[in-house]
Image (cartoon, grey):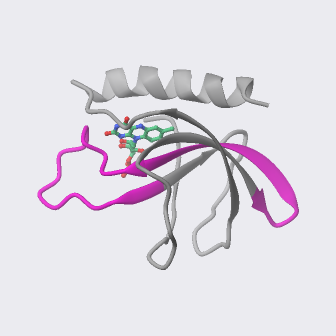
Amino acid sequence: MGFPTANLEVSSLILPPNGVYSAVAKVKEEIYRVALNVGWRPTVASASPQLRVEAHLLGFSGQLYGRELELELGTRIRDEMRFASPAELRVQIERDVAAVRAAE
Ligand SMILES: Cc1cc2nc3c(=O)[nH]c(=O)nc-3n(C[C@H](O)[C@H](O)[C@H](O)COP(=O)(O)O)c2cc1C
């Protein structure tokens, strides 16, 4: 969808309520702003939906697979929602990213 995400392994963690958040991530010694989604991804059809925590790191390019990620949760942006199409979700994620940029 144009927003690559790190799919976090969170099975032993306490999670915030489902929704979209701004956050800050530390990868090695670098800091990135993050648009974070916690939820079931109701827009994505799946026979067995699973709770996911997905982090889109603004300005990051590269691989995060297997890396440890330190995340500091910021403000809550909105509830997770079901969109009629991936295109509509994409427009909303663009707004979420703008909200993350605006949240200092
Ligand atoms: C900032 C952000 C907000 C999201 N909001 C929603 C949402 O409201 N509803 C939803 O169904 N999925 C949401 N998603 C999850 C996307 O559906 C998911 O990242 C996308 O389908 C790509 O999935 P894939 O990595 O398995 O291809 C969000 C993801 C991000 C990064």
> Residue 44's x, y, as percent?
25, 43
Q: Range of the magenta residues?
A: 26-53
Q: Quadrant of ligand 1?
A: top left
The residue sitting at 51% across, 65% down in the picture is 8
Q: Tally the numbered discs.
A: 0
The residue sitting at 30% across, 29% down in the picture is 86
- Taking the image as shown, residue 46 lies to the left or right of residue 31, namely left
For residue 63, above or below residue 19: below
Q: From this viewpoint, which residue is outermost toward the right?
A: 29
Q: In the image, is residue 50 part of the stretch drawn in magenta?
A: yes
Work out whether residue 1 or residue 9 is closer to the camera in this orientation and state it: 9
Q: In the image, is residue 24 part of the stretch drawn in magenta?
A: no
The residue sitting at 34% across, 21% down in the picture is 88
For residue 37, above or below residue 101: below
Work out whether residue 63 or residue 22 is closer to the camera in this orientation and state it: 22
- Taking the image as shown, residue 19 lies to the left or right of residue 23, namely left
> Residue 68's x, y, as percent?
67, 73
The residue sitting at 17% across, 53% down in the picture is 46
For residue 90, above or below residue 29: above
> Residue 85's x, y, as percent?
25, 26
> Residue 48's x, y, as percent?
16, 61
Work out whether residue 1 or residue 28 is closer to the camera in this orientation and state it: 28
- Taking the image as shown, residue 88 lies to the left or right of residue 65, namely left
Work out whether residue 4 or residue 69 is closer to the camera in this orientation and state it: 69
Q: Quadrant of the N terminus?
A: top left
Q: Quadrant of the C terminus?
A: top right
